[in-house]
Amino acid sequence: MRSNKLTRLVSAGLVVTMLLAQAACAKEDTSKKVTIEPMEPEESYALSFDILGGKDVMPVGGFDGPYSGRNHSPNAQPLPDFFTEEYMKTFAECGVNLILYAEDDYATEKGQKLLDFGEKYGVGIFINDNSICNMRGKDEKLSVELLSEKVAKYRNHPAFCGLYLVDEPGGKTYWTKDAGNNMEDYTNLSGILRNDLGLELYENLITINSKSQEGQYEGYLEEYCETMHPSYISFDHYVWDEGGTKNLFLYNTAIVREYAQKYKLPFWTYIAAGSNWSMTGIETENNTPTEGQFDWSINASLALGAQGIEYFMLIQPFYFAYTPEPNVFDFERNGLLGARGNKNRWYYYAQDISKQISAIDHVLMNSVSKGVIASGEDAKMDISGARDVMIKEDSWRELAGVEGDAIVGCFNYQGKTALYVVNYDETYAQDITLNFYDKYKMQVIQAGETKYVQADKLTLNMEAGDGILIVVQ
């Protein structure tokens, strides 16, 4: 577990204070000063929703939302009905502001009740309407009038954010699937919903499994952007799964980032809340990720330019609680909430890091990612092959250099320099030092707390996988 936040912030403040005192006593050195040219503001293409709080609020979603657990009783253990105000409040309290999908059909009275709870707690809902999903691949039945009639009962609700359409669709070059689940099978359906009815749609893309699939995956992303005309790109890559590596995670994220920028779209990324996704039961001893790994996944994604975070799973489905032993269930191995409604460790990790996300999202939602600086042998090695995301000079604008094992996301924040510093070590805390070309006034946001400093050198005390935002004033 991470150390007390107050202790960490006080420690960081002492480091900054010492640096300022040293700078005041030393003779001013002008030899390293450089002229930093003004940076023109650039348009950010982030997507958010009024129900979340407006354009400055980052979507933080969950996959597998409320379902009628009372329909299932594993080992005669009745599961809760998650369609209650209590659970909606529970989601909001850990920073989740968007429900992306649930197996239950939400185009029902239960879905209407969920929308009402969402409106009360500022949580948006993507509706899973089975009658619409089932029309994939059935173009002969499609019409604007029919679809307009289907969505009429919920589309004007304040908590309605869009429609769930498909998860991990197949493409012509990559991940081809059965009829009805490939992009070409529902192009007309999505076209009517997006273009004629003006609705947002949820479609999450599969990940790349190997660098050897790069060309196929590029075709997959190109097909998606050219034929589906999305408002954002959502994808999943779980770095701590068996066989996962930081290198492949960064590589995958860099490819998605490249196409998002090409088509002027934001991208959202999934974070694993747990492990052992099995419907038949597997050993449950390795319940990853740890808090440091969980935080690293989020902070590294933000450093590369993600403007939306998604948790898998929000609520553990009952069949993900199966174990190898008959009639024995594990409700703690995945999900922010277990299938019995229990708060798992990842709930508290999400609640903790939500303080940082809510303190910095107004900056990141209005910024344009310019690349990432890697410092330290491991970070440099992992990110060096990640397409064009790496800033090879090891410096950017006011930032002259970085000391320690870190990645630093570099952003144009409405003409200002913004830096998102991430401790690359997901296991141990460390100090990361930033050297600047001159003394600058800076806003420093760590663990949701803001400080203002003026210095030409900052030493940051960072927990495992920690992230700190710095805006040069």
Image (spheres, grey):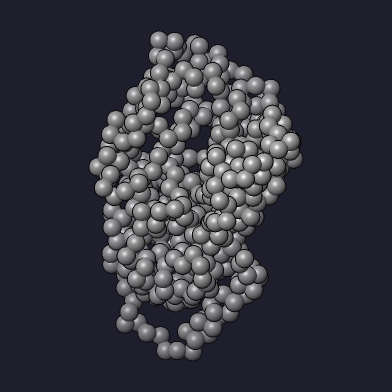
| Residue 321 in sight in this render | no
| Residue 381 in sight in this render | yes
Q: Quadrant of residue 352?
A: bottom right
Q: How far from the left and from the top, in percent, is residue 392?
A: 28, 64
The residue drawn where x is 44% and y is 10% is 141
Choose between 283 and 40: the one closer to the eye.
283
Q: How far from the left and from the top, in percent, is residue 327?
A: 67, 41
Q: How far from the left and from the top, in percent, is residue 427?
A: 51, 67
Above/below status of 104 relative to 313: above
Q: Quadrant of residue 70?
A: top right
Q: Is residue 378 left or right of residue 128?
A: left
The residue drawn where x is 56% and y is 75% is 12
Above/below status of 261 relative to 429: above
Q: Is residue 430 left or right of residue 218?
A: right
The residue drawn where x is 39% and y is 43% is 207
Q: How far from the left and from the top, in percent, is residue 162?
A: 53, 29
The residue drawn where x is 46% and y is 46% is 269
Quadrant of the drawing holding the N terminus: bottom right
